[in-house]
Image: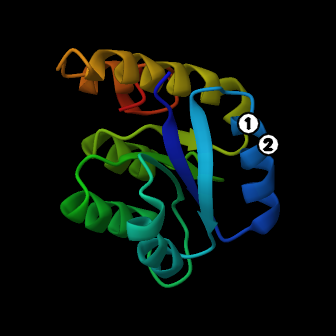
Amino acid sequence: MKTYRAMLIDDHAGFRRFLHRCLAHYPFIEVVGEARSAEEAWAAIPRLLPDLLTVDIHLPGRNGFEFARKVRDRYPGIDVVFISFTGNQSFRKTAGEMSCPYLTKENLLEDLDPVLEALRNCLRLAGEDENCEDDKNQGTNNTVGDTVG
């Protein structure tokens, strides 16, 4: 089975540990690294070669959106899931414009499963050269337009 190689990017070590434990329940997710800042993550990406980044919106030195844009410019095959404490509509809109899931930490346990299942569906379709952007954008009603995108 193909797996996502995930990297967790959040400045709170306790949340990274919690998310790591949550993701351990998904056999198609392998956590390959963690970072507490965008700069630390940027330095580790070429070494770890993740397929998936979970990115906090508020990171030291650079916000998560800026970081994700930089990552996508350099590594367009990496999927990004934004995670934040706030359900700010502006943040949700920005994530949606970037075609990225946006989850709040408060609702993470309810919303994580549908997002990861949509990503897993994309793993299955990737071998068939299907465009799975629509699948990735399904899952929760936690963003603008009742999609994750």
Res 104 visible: yes
> Eyeballing the image, is 71 above or below 22?
below
Circles 2 and 1: CB atoms closer than 8 Å: yes
Q: Mark 2 points at which residue?
A: 21
Identify the residue at image location x=46%, y=27%. 2
Number of marks: 2
**Label 1: element kind:** loop
Residue 118 location in percent, x, y?
45, 20
As shown in the figure, which amino acid type bears the numbered disc 1?
Answer: Ala
Res 33 → quadrant:
bottom right
Q: Which residue lies furthest to the bottom in this view?
A: 61
Residue closer to the observer: 115 or 130: 130
Q: How would you rate the neighbour count of disc 2 (Cα within 10 Å): few for under 14, some for 14-19, many for 20 or more?
A: few
Res 107 visible: no
* Residue 32 placement (x, y as % from top left): 59, 54
**Residue for point 47% across, 22% down:** 120
Q: What residue type is labelled 2?
A: Arg
Q: How crowded is mark 1: few (under 14 residues within 10 Å), some or many (20 or more)?
A: few
Find disc 1 in the rendering and name its residue. Answer: 24
